[in-house]
Image: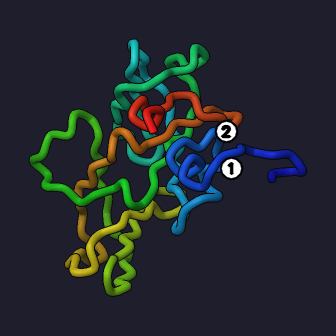
Amino acid sequence: TRFGSIAQIGSPLDLYHRPANLFAAGFIGSPRMNFLPAQVVATTGTRVDIKLDDSGETLALTDRTIEASLKAGTRVTLGIRPEHLTITAPQVDQAGMTLTREVAFTEQLGELTYVHLDVRGGRPLIAKAPGSSNVRAGERHVFSVSPGSSHLFDESGNAVAVARSTLLH
């Protein structure tokens, strides 16, 4: 519940894969979902292009069911879970689904490593890597964003561009 009302009803996995709003998205998962402020650049059919505030990078979110209210210039929040950010080779073309960030610090926990990435003026972005990962603070890496596992929320915090792959479960 949020402010005395139910934010979303469903199984834990429903809330994890298909959060209806920012509150539900941030409630399930540890570490919690990463939230990045952005602006819609364009929408075409089942694709939304967004520009991230912190880096100016543009991401293309494809194969989406898009709310009619989502237009160029709309302020949005991109949600990405740490396990859906993966270190990738710089030359790999992910069709607009990569972020380049500097590593602020790492937490090596045995089986996995949390990689905390620098976000200018905001809370660090967290990615998960294998425990044997040799990532170091100060290094710049390219991270691919799992296209079917990213979420987009409007200024009111409601999901507005749901990946069609998450609708099939």
Q: Nearer the viewer, residue 79 or 58?
A: 79
Q: Nearer the viewer, residue 64 or 97?
A: 64
Left or right: where 160 falls relative to 55: right
Picture coordinates of residue 23, whole percent (x, y)? 68, 50
Query: Do labels 2 and 1 touch, CB within 8 Å?
Result: yes
Name the residue located 57 percent from the left edge and 20 percent from the top edge.
67
Most distant residue in the left direction: 91
Q: Which mark is residue 100?
A: none
Q: Position of residue 132 (x, y in %)?
A: 22, 81
Q: Which of marks 1 and 2 precedes in the sequence?
A: 1
Residue 23's disc is: 1
The percent position of residue 88, horizontal first and vertical second, equals 19, 56
- Graded by Cα atoms within 10 Å as few (under 14), some (14 to 19) or many (20 or more), the crowding at tag 2 reads some
The type of residue carrying mark 2 is Gly
Tell me if 40 is positioned left or right of 45 in this view: right
**Residue drawn at point x = 56 percent, y = 34 percent:** 76
**Crowd tier of the residue under label 1, counting other residues whose Cα lies within 10 Å: few below 14, some 14–19, many 20 or above:** some
Badge 1 amino acid: Phe
Question: Is 152 drawn above or below residue 5 in the view shown?
Answer: above
Q: Residue at x 42, y 29 (%)?
A: 164
Residue 65 percent across, percent down from the top left = 48, 22
Q: Quadrant of residue 155?
A: top right
**Residue found 24% across the figure and 60% down from its top:** 87
* Badge 1 element: helix
Q: Give the Cα separation between the discs numbered 2 and 1.
A: 8 Å
Pick the quarter of the image with the C terminus: top left
Residue at the disc numbered 2? 157
